Amino acid sequence: MVSEVDEISTASSTAKPGSTNVTETPGGICPVCNQSAKKRCSGCSLVYYCSVEHQKQDWKNHKHVCHPFKISSDERFGRYMEATKDIKAGAIVLKEAPLVCGPSQITAPVCVGCLQALTEKQFLECERCGWPVCKRKCQDRSSHQAECKFTMARGSKMSLQHFYVPHPVYQCVTPLRCLLLAETNPAKWQSLIKLESHEDQRRGSKQWRDDREGVAKLIPRFFKCENKWTEDEILRVTGILQVNGHEIPLTDPPSVAVYSNASMAEHSCTPNLAKTFTTKGEIVLWAPNPIKSGERLSISYSDVLWSTCNRLDHLQQTKLFRCTCARCIDPTEFGTYFSAMKCSGFKKDSSCTGLLLPESGKNWHSNWTCNKCKAAVEFKEISTILDRVRVDLDAMEKTNEKHCNLFISHYSRWLSPNHHYLVDVKILLSQVIGGGSPDAIKEISDEDLMSKMKMCQDLIRLFEKICPAEARVIGTTRFELHAALAEFARRGVESGGPAVKSALEDSLYNANECVRMLSNECDEMPESHICEQARINVKSLMMLLGLRME
């Protein structure tokens, strides 16, 4: 029997409440007997019970809504999730199955069952409707059944003629799955249509026009159902997908899914929740760090390791809003200068040590100004350098240590030390140095080992400032630091160095932090394998240090 409500509300829906799951409070009404109650559920802090016995009786109903948050709203931000209790580091805040999942709108042909990529020479057709699958059992997956019957009703099978990227008919698959929920699962349909579509803001935009031609007009024509849905109904569903869709990295290429409660988590470029997925397609939102009761719960709708300019543009284009989170309104990004450029890189023989940021601090496409000498640089000059950096980064052999070092050395002339493009390469380099095989780190020089350690330490300090909930990148960097510290200790033993115990303790700490940050990743994710190795290494380090496992 589970004795802590945090385990009940976050670990699994099959857990049962125990004897300490209620706390004394001013009072409410017990949902079982409708009598006055002073004991409150510790999982959500929202429901009152007169006794533990009545809490147990109500658990079958309550477990579906027992979360440590409530849905609040205001005129400016709309609906959002607000913590109803202090949330401990590591706690799972929400685990939720999708309302709908399917291929991304822009994709090459994929299996309509498992959503994995297909090749032109290796695929089968669903025996009933003709949609492509990778193996026979995929045609019987529940997610495919509604569109399968709908395709059969058109009177002819689907016939895949080419493998273009993107394939035009695949734009329709996930919107169609949404529309068919009204018949196959009315409860999910009602949850789906309550989500924001931003249809008024989207109307008339290039994306809206593309959706009108490629989805709203194609569905009635292709499936021969001209009178089933109006153009506006199809466009609304398409908007809901684009605004609320989550990219699922468990398929190749990534697929998309929409969730009900998870869609209430607001955006922040410094979110307090991490996001991952289970093999069943469930989304898992959890707290890498403690969260206070009353705090808004946030995830990032963009990539937190992009520049402010890129994040703002991406959010405006895909989610139709301009971000005003604390990080975006601070051009220095909490003093990290993650998007800044060096003034000296744009002047001949300049000795200025200042950094360039937009003059207004808001318009990233305006002129940039040095924070020391106040010299201005036109944005087109900034853009020219950044375009060149991006091209070289894309073309670079990312597992080549020499190429990584050359990139950093060359572009450090223009980019601030913490610039996001340099950080991208430093992350790669931290994994390349001493990587490739379990014993490779033993072969690197002392200089390279110290460089790896410092690089990881600098990266972790940076991440803790700008993205402390970005569990995957922090966890993997912690693993690299742990490995470097363990090797440093090994060399210290051989040379009789005095700092061996301290290095082993630091290595153990980072290995444990790696496990903490990556323990929610499912087996299909590479971070899960890193986590498992870290667990093994923790046991070895504790034996070396003479510590007992808890």
Image (tube, rainbow, N blue to C red):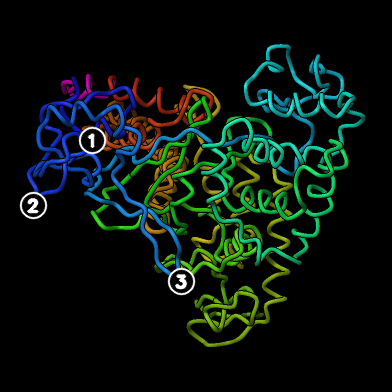
* Front of the two marks 1 and 3: 1
Q: Is residue 103 above or below residue 143?
A: below
Labelled disc at residue 6: 1
Q: Is residue 201 above or below residue 256?
A: below
Report the amino acid beneath label 2: Pro
Report the amino acid beneath label 1: Asp
Q: Residue at x 54, y 76 (%)?
A: 357
Q: Residue at x 67, y 31 (%)?
A: 252
Percent x, y for residue 364?
60, 74
Report the amino acid beneath label 3: Thr
Residue tagged by mark 3? Answer: 332
Between discs 2 and 1, the one toward the N terminus: 1
* Front of the two marks 2 and 1: 2
Q: Please, what secondary structure does the residue beneath circle 1 have? A: helix
Q: Residue at x 31, y 34 (%)?
A: 10
* Front of the two marks 3 and 2: 2
Taking 262 as reference, is 156 left or right? right
Between discs 3 and 2, the one toward the N terminus: 2
Q: Residues within 10 Å of mark 2 (few under 14, many from 20)?
A: few
Highlighted magenta segment, given as a residue range: 540-550
Quarter containing the C terminus = top left
Residue tagged by mark 2? Answer: 26
